[in-house]
Image: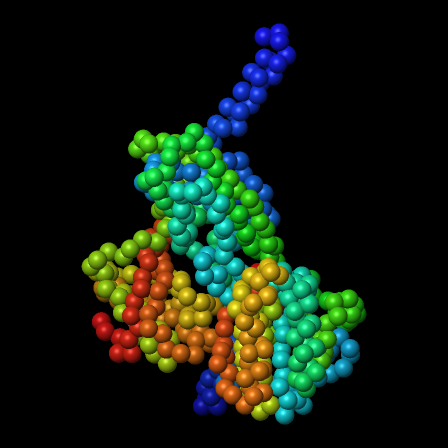
Amino acid sequence: MRNPIKVLRFFSCFLLVLILLPDARASATLIPHGTVDFVAENQWITPGQQTYLGINFQLENGWHIYWVNPGDSGQPPRVEWHLPTGLRAGEIEWPAPRRLGNSTIVDFGYDDAVMLLVPIRASSALPTNPAVQLGVQLRVLVCREICIPGSAQLSLTLPIKSMPPEVDARSSELFTAARRSLPRRAPGDWEFHVSDLKDSFVLTGKLGRQTTRATFFPFEESQVDNAAPQKVVPVATGFQLTLRKSDELLKPIKRLKGVLELSPNQAYVIDIAVSDDPVTR
Amino acid sequence: MKRFILFSVLFALVVLGSPLLILAAKVGEPAPDFTGTASNNQTYHLADYRGKFVVLEWHNNGCPYTRKHYNSGNMQKLQKQWTAQGVVWFTILSSAPGKQGYVDANGENTYMAKMGAAPTAALLDPTGTIGHSFDAKTTPQMIVINPQGVIIYDGAIDNRPTDDVKDIAGATNYVNLALGQALAGKPVETAATRPYGCSVKYKGSWF
């Protein structure tokens, strides 16, 4: 190994291996008042299968970012994907948000920490590869009393293997926690009804048990008054929730879509036709 | 005793009911009147401008969304374009002292000179009185009032709710649309939108 050329060759091979080594979890990138990292659920991508990536935000105490409908102010994080041919990113899956704000301005978002999940669909024609790079250009508005726009270029290197996917133990807890916070489909035996009253919508839920807590987060802006308190009336079989209409709502709406949260980590996606019939019990 | 009961009821109504009595303005309803002191030291009464279209622009010079429209020159262009046609334009600063966007008269005059801002006047509203009476939620929220004193538009400046200057080109500007249609004697098609931006930094708001 005295030959300097050989030493150099050895060294560069070593470096190349280091660079190509797959990393399921890239190191955290700084954003205003927090960090973000980009994690993969599986150790490799399998052609023809779907895998999940996570955009994991950690924020300083008191700072928040926004849900897909940000509420009265703010803006949700935006992503622009840079993926190799054969990989396609789906829509962001948003955990149930929290109401943030005071009596006159209420936003929907996340404080402290949140992981957004993104499904990545791999084409079955995807050739195996020791290392492909998955990149995303992220823009995010981080707010406390004031708002600071930030951006980050995130990337992750994963191999493409024709073997069944295997979970990466380093990120599995994060994905488990993130999935718990995602709104899911409401059980088939639950019934919902939305009545259109003059100034409000009344959402009635029949869940087979008395329900004392319920919060609704509309997917669409300008339907519900974000800042108005949501009045829950428990009834024997469920609840009745009064949602004040937004002043920005000038036309009747056909459906009310959003997330109904009954307790932390117990949120459901609902999409209910709005009727002008009186509330049924 | 009857008088005492009556008094108590009235007292309860006034005290407990007062937050409800402050009904915020809505599209299609008369704009609440206000008196504001401007950075030029003049006093302005909204009611004095019956017969003219009036634009209200909520402003916070530190808000990224306000900066989008000022750094690009978009807001100044709108101010010049519409005041040249006889429209009255009030920029309203409802940030409380110590909060982002709060400036005194000198501070606002310096800012306006530097940015080439050209509203009719910049009203200093550090108590948030004007802001709350219109239920202004964000900067830059925009309100258009017709010559009869009725609100004909309330909401966002345009249809691109971002802080990116690149999004101004090609955006649908709702203020232009509302003033254009109203000046042509047509009804305003898009009369209310979600007013995107930063929350107004009112006194007592933590956010």
Query: Which residue shows up at 43% across the image and 55% down it?
Result: A97
Circle count = 0
Place of residue A259 in the rendered image (x, y in percent of width and height, measured from the top left)? 36, 60
Residue A75 in sight in this render: yes
Instruction: Please name whichever residue, A171 or A1, is drawn nearer the observer in this view of the structure.
Output: A1
Q: Is residue B113 above or below residue A77?
A: below
Query: Which residue shows up at 48% across the image and 53% down it?
Result: A110
- Residue A144 lies left or right of residue A96; in this view the side is right
- Residue A280 lies left or right of residue A202; in this view the side is left
Q: Is residue B3 above or below residue B206?
A: below
Q: In which quadrant of the rendered image does the C terminus of chain B lie? A: bottom right
Instruction: Please name whichever residue, A23 or B59, is drawn nearer the observer in this view of the structure.
Output: A23
What's the image's color scheme? rainbow
- Residue A171 lies left or right of residue B135; in this view the side is left
Place of residue A276 in the rendered image (x, y in percent of width and height, measured from the top left)? 29, 78
Query: Which residue shows up at 49% across the image and 51% down it?
Result: A79
Residue B101 in sight in this render: no
Q: Is residue B37 above or below residue A7?
A: below
Place of residue A42 in the rendered image (x, y in percent of width and height, measured from the top left)? 38, 35
Q: Is residue B152 above or below residue A79?
A: below
Q: Quadrant of residue A217?
A: bottom left
Query: Which residue shows up at 51% across the image and 39% down it?
Result: A155
Place of residue A200 in the rendered image (x, y in percent of width and height, measured from the top left)? 38, 75
